[in-house]
Every structure is written in structure tokens, then in C-alpha cells.
Amino acid sequence: MNADTELRYDFIAPQRIVFGWGRRSEVGKLARTLGRRALLISGLPPAVGETVIAEIAEILRAEGIESVPLGAIDHEPEVADVDRVAARLRQQNVAAGDFLLAVGGGAAVDLAKAAAAMATNTESPSVKDYLEGVGRDLAILRPPLPVLAMPTTAGTGAEATRNAVISSYDPPFKKSLRNEQLVPRIALLDPELCVSAPPAVTAASGMDAITQLIESYISRKAQPIPQALAVQGLRLAMPAIAEAVEDGTSRPAREKMSHAALLSGMALANSGLGMAHGVAPALGTICRVPHGEACAVMLPAALRTNRVVCEAQLARLARHVFPRESFASDSRAVDALVEEIESLCSRVGIPRRLSQLGVKAEQIPDLVKNSRGSSMSGNPRELSDEELTKILEDLL
Ligand SMILES: [Zn+2]
């Protein structure tokens, strides 16, 4: 947002956000405000998930809430996953008083959000028909079941967004189910739940949050509230990510990363994203690169590509992130930001080159063709296919 821009915006967020170490103990009382039967989706690995889900089910039972496990997910949700869970929901004859409870990373939360919508919107048995630009383009007409999201990773911010990202590998696409009613009703963030996330997951999801904060800040659709959130999120996350990766039990690092990830979700839901998130879905479906790593590997290139049109904005952000530095020029400030992002990626073990993630030169034309989704439309600069090809070749 520029100082002379007319103030005019919408802002959406979960109806209720509850944040704090150990506060999963409050899930029963919170859930009571949504209904009497919890349809549970877990994104935790079985060894951890069993204990956590049993603990949550017990807290719910004490409040008179029945839990129905709908299954677990260990990968980014695909069309078939959503369709299967939605079919199970329909078999359960869902009605008023039922709600979805997701305990997991972005995959579980997005699966719950999509299934909640498919449970009440039954014009097609497949979510594909409701995704942007790949099926019949059906609209979500009826309110989805309410969703209570309990993230166990700090990254996607899916607990605060209005879309659910759904993949397909044959044919390859990664598209959003998008509607503002998809925003979870309650986001319950207990950073202690993230302690079990292994270092590689903590690194990739944390870099995803950082990418979301930066891209939403400089997005063509940037808005004032998300920009304020992005500043706070980055000031917390950039100094904390390495500690969260290196000492997963660090309470301050986990708290800062969870809070920053939540802010990144609110920021992206209202401001859109940019080039790194524009290319990430194609890297996911064509080269099977996980979302967080895809964003992190693209972020420095996105900053270098975009700085020519948003140097002042990026410099402002850099001065917030490094409050004790006095930079001689905007250009120096942006250099420092880009260098810090690159050094964080190296420190937390994110590959710096696409080839290290298995990307092959012959896949680049396909990557370029499939990078034109909604995230790219927020990129500060218009990129031609030739420019994007060159950017990807240079990163190989
Ligand atoms: Zn992301």
C-alpha cells in the first residue's frame, strides 16, 4: 500500500482465533460452540497421531461431544482424497450440530475445509467440478459444515484462509476450492502440537510462511491490514526459524513460528501472493516438489525479479525486519533482505537449486505453462513466458 492510496478494503479471518501453548485443553468448550459431533481428520503420523487424537477425543467426550474419526492424510490432498472423505461424510448423514475437526498440517486442514463444503454441496460427487478452471466450475451455494482447525505445523496458515488447495497428478493440476465460507470457524493454535514436527518439515513449512508474508506484502493486491500483519510476522519468524529447526522443543521459537504462520494465512487470504506461489503448484504436480520447499527455492529469485518495480516497498519491509541497521539506500536494504533469506534457506537445509529437488531442464516449458494460476496474478511484475523460462533455467 502506498501512502497516497485511497483506503478501501475488505478483510476476512476466522471468527475466533485461540492461541497459546497447551490450549488444546480448551478444545471441548470451543467445539461446543460449533456442535455435538466432531468428524475428525488427522494429518499427524500414526505414532504421534494416536496419542494426540485420543487426548482430543477424551476432552471432547468430557464436554458431551462424540468423535467420529474420518481418517488420516500424509500427503497434500488430492481430488480422490476429498471425494472419499466427502462420501464418508454423506454416509454419516451429516446435519446441523456436526462439524469437522482437523488436527494436522495444511494438508489435513485443507482436506477438512474441502470435505466440509462437499458435504453440503452435492451437485457433483467430485470436488473437481468445484475447482477453479478444471471441471464444471460449479459454485458453492450452501454453507459448508463448520471447521475447527488445530494446526500441528507452522507454515501454510490454512487455518486462516478461504481456499483449500487440491492436487491431481493425472491430469496434473493443483487448484483451489475457493469461497469465503471455507475460512475455518475456529482456529485453535497450540504451538506445543508443533513440537513433534521433524526439522525438515519445520524448515519447509516455516519458509512457506515467510514466503507468504513477503509475497502478500508486495502483492499487486496488497492491503493495509495484511501488510501490518506481514511486518509483525516477519520480525518474529526470520529470527526464529533456525532455532525452531535446530531445537524443536524450543517454546519461544515454536510460538513465534505458529503465530507468524497464522498471520501469513490471514495476509495471503486477503492480499494474494506472487511468483514463488505462482510456480510452486507446477513444481508440485509436475516435479513432485513439496509446497514449502518449492516456495523457499523460488523466493530469492522472486525478490530479485520483482525488486525493480517494488524496491521502496521491499526496502520498507527490510527496515522493519532489521530495525537496528541503518541502510545507506533502499537498494542496500533490499540486498540485505535477499541475502538474509538465502542464508536462512542454507542454514535450515532448503536446497537452493531446482535440480537438487529433482527438476529436469526438459520440464521447464511445462512448468512455465502451468504457473499461470491465481497466485501469479498478484505478482508485482508481469512476467512473459520467456522471462519465466530464463528465471527457471538460471535456478536449475
Ligand atoms: Zn504457501
Image: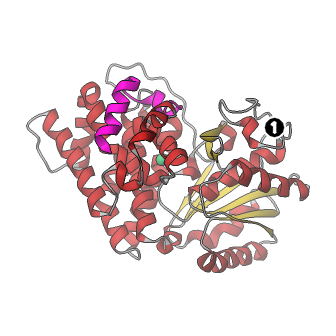
Residue 378 part of the magenta-drawn span: yes
Does the segment drawn in magenta span residue 31? Answer: no
Q: Position of residue 329 (x, y in %)?
A: 11, 34
Above-or-below relation of 294 to 48:
above
Q: Is residue 354 left or right of residue 69?
A: left
Q: Residue at x 28, y 28 (%)?
A: 310
Determine whether 4 is above or below 198 in the image. Answer: above
Query: Which residue is drawn at the image coordinates 68% and 62% (left, top)?
Result: 30
Quick check: 344 left or right of 221? left
Res. 69 image quadrant: bottom right
Q: Is residue 152 left or right of residue 138?
A: left
Q: Nearer the viewer, residue 140 or 65?
A: 140
Q: Amino acid at mark 1?
A: Arg
Residue at the image position 42 percent from the left and 40 percent from the top: 362
The residue stretch that appears in magenta: 371-396
- Structural crowding at the residue carrying mark 1, measured as other residues with C-alpha within 10 Å and reported as few (<14), some (14–19) or many (≥20): few
- Circle 1 sits on which residue? 142
**Residue 310 makes an appearance in the image:** yes
In the figure, is residue 69 to the left or right of 17? right
**Residue at image location 25% in from the left, 48% down from the top:** 321
Examine the rendered structure and indicate whether residue 195 appears above or below residue 352. Answer: below
* Residue 383 in view: no
The percent coordinates of residue 390 (x first, y second) are 32, 32
Q: Quadrant of residue 128?
A: top right
Q: Secondary structure at mark 1?
A: loop
Viewport quadrant of the C terminus: top left
